Amino acid sequence: MALQTKTYTQSSNTFALELTLVEQSTSTAGNSSTISYTLKLKSTTKNFAQYGVGAAVKLDNQTVAVRDRGSAPKITLGTYSEVTLLSGTHTVGHNSDGSKSMSLFFELDMASASYTPGYVSKSGTMTLTKIPRGATITSAPNFTDEDDPVVKVSNPAGVSVQLGIFKDSTHALADYRTISGTSYTFRLTQAEREPMRKVDTTKNTAQVRFYVMSTVGGQTFITYLIRTLTIKNPAPTLAPTVKDVNQTTLALTGESGNLVKYYSKVAVKTGAQAVKGASLVRQSITCGSHTLAGDGTLEGVESGTIVVSATDSRGNTTTKTVERKLVGYVRLSCTMGQGTPDASGRYDLEVTGACFYGSFGGAENTLTVEYRYRAQGAEEWGAWTAVDRATQLGFTYVAHATVEGLDYQTAYEFQARAEDALEQVESQVKVVKASPGFDWGKDDFAFHIPVYIQGVKVTPDVGQNLLINPFFTVNQRGSTTYTITKPAYTLDCWKTSGDTTAGEVVVGQNYAKLTNSSGTLGLGQFVEDYGALAGETVTLSMAVDILSGSYHLGLNDGTGQAGEVLSQKGLQVCTLTVTLSDSPSQLWCQLISEGAASCRIFAAKLEVGDHQTLAIQGEDGTWQLTQQPDPLELLRCYRYQYVPVEGDNSYPMGYGFAFSNTSARMMFPCGVKMRIAPSVTFLNGSALSGIGIFNNGASHTPTAVAGTRNLPGGVGVIFTTSGLVTNDVCTLRSISGKLLFDANL
């Protein structure tokens, strides 16, 4: 059956030379077509009969038929008639893709006359019917390593088709599989996905090839499309474990997951695994300032937050934070206090230091303070003896003992030691010697013991200190460093002054350190009952260690008076004596810098009189304080501000009852009556969301503070909330908040 028929004609002198080409058949196997050809000469009004008529036909640049002019038989052509010159068939091969544009040429070769056409020729092309060849991919997607990609193909020959996914021309990822139809979904196995994931382990994408293969007429056809494979969820996984392996701290916490600051020895494993053919190139473990480059042990951790991370060869990083309860252990210290034996051989020994009071979780911490002594120059020490008493001051302690029977003419070496569940520390050796009851020189007759005449004491007591928290031992706000951009309270009752925007107050062991890089920075205190001091002569003194810059004391009763500027470095006692106004409007006492400066303040005193009794200076120039911190100083500070101890489910911060379903009246017992009904603020920015009112088994977040009341033994606060059971007990517990009751001057 003919597929195509084409006729090509060339006219001359009323004659027409005509070539008819017919596609007889096509061969898919042979990739060829069989063409029949017929060359005719046609006349209209003229005719002839003669010999010497030649002709030729060329197909695909090949001569397929020739009529020789010299030997051809006579042709007789009448008017309006035709004669076939040449005919036959010819096979034409197609291009590899099955297409073919065939060239053609035909001619008539005879002598020219008025009654003949003469020489006639024509050339041209014929586009043959395309023969179906190999299958091709019409569409293929970019896909992930977890997808089942769908590929569509064209199969014009209708032969068997195979599809596969390859890395390149030789490395199969998903080997050829025979398909039917024009669409195929790759149901990839895990065994096929794994090598795909390893095509490129340096990034999250890779180039892969979809190949199609078919065989037509014994010829194999292979074509491909390049597509992008994306690795889904490529980041490494982490399964960290954190475990305290210090047997000592384990015995105290009772839980390997709980840590003790400074002492826990924490074994950390990242549990990191690279996925989908990648490899791990980096791991890290961070806990505060401690770092590890992989699994290992952290010594002396200072944080309960442990961050682990892992990075794979593709550059993917996974980070996970592990939170562990950290017991805020305070490192133990031990310092011998000031003082000397009296003339009777009695020595009131004092030991101070930092310590941790509280539970490790499985056991309470313990504190033992002991002392020993020997005559100076003796080889053997006396036995360690426990102190008479020890008093807690926040995270510090003050221990006292009375030693009798010392020889006032002998110098003694004293040493103290403190021991808790984790540490034992010793103080430096202190040499003490009693002063005689009295001595005299050419200029004085000095008594070193109280003198009574007929039962009346004639030597004065050390003057009363009118300042609160004079030894900087109470710090309810809890910060170790106060960044100062404007005047603000820091340690209890102590407020900064000046115009610095770049200062800080650092809380040390019984001292406050002031540092400012520009402007002025002072630390001072308002005296509450200043009216009672009208017209009095008072002396302000401070024990100061100037590190840099210069400072002066200041007293302001409404007029303002300043002492001399001090710039000599080192420990010294500076004083300012003034007579107050008969009608003072305030009384502000401070130490303030003159420009950029730094110093430490160890003690301060405001007293009535024209001289200081804060400290005495020995012949060697060293200063000794005449008094030590009062264990009851915290109660004095409660009058001005009170920070309830953060509780837990067992020990709430405050308690009370539900006055209504929206109002809870709570009591916070501090043991003293505050100066005024305090305001309620928050130390850690959590505001009301950081505390919870527990009532009838449920926790309720307060929405507002409706008011406060100053009570004889503490503070009353009204909280508003919702959902309370009226007249039922309420307890206030800390979730993340820290309350401050502020009645400061």
Image (tube, rainbow, N blue to C red):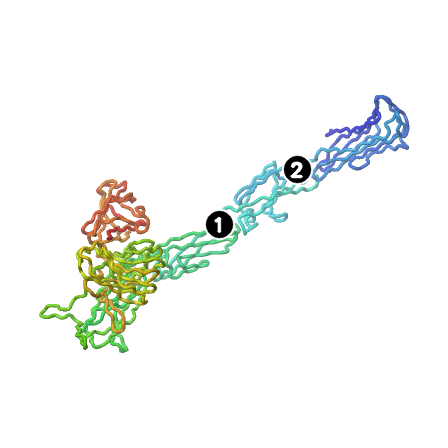
**Image quarter for residue 695?**
top left
Query: Which disc is residue 577 wearing?
Result: none
Q: Nearer the viewer, residue 131 or 107?
A: 107
Can you name the residue that lies furthest to the left here?
A: 454
User: What is the x, y in percent for residue 272?
Assistant: 46, 54
The residue where tag 1 is placed is 235
**Image quarter for residue 538?**
bottom left
- How far is mark 2 from mark 1, CA to CA? 44 Å
**Vertical placement of 575 versus 488: above or below?**
below
The residue where tag 2 is placed is 159
User: Badge 1 local density, few (<14 within 10 Å), some, or many (20+)?
Assistant: many
The reply to whether residue 142 is in sight is: yes
User: What is the x, y in percent for residue 256?
Assistant: 36, 57
Q: Nearer the viewer, residue 403 or 159?
A: 403
Residue drawn at (53%, 48%) of the image: 204
Residue drawn at (79%, 28%) of the image: 9
Tag 1 secondary structure: loop
The reply to whether residue 383 is in sight is: no
Marks 2 and 1 close (CB-CB < 8 Å): no
Amino acid marked by disc 2: Val
User: What is the x, y in percent for residue 79?
Assistant: 85, 21
Tag 2 secondary structure: loop
In the rendered view of the protein, which quadrant contains the N terminus?
A: top right
Q: Left or right of 5: which side holds 332?
A: left
Q: Earlier in the sequence, mark 2 or mark 1?
A: 2
User: What is the x, y in percent for residue 195?
Assistant: 56, 49
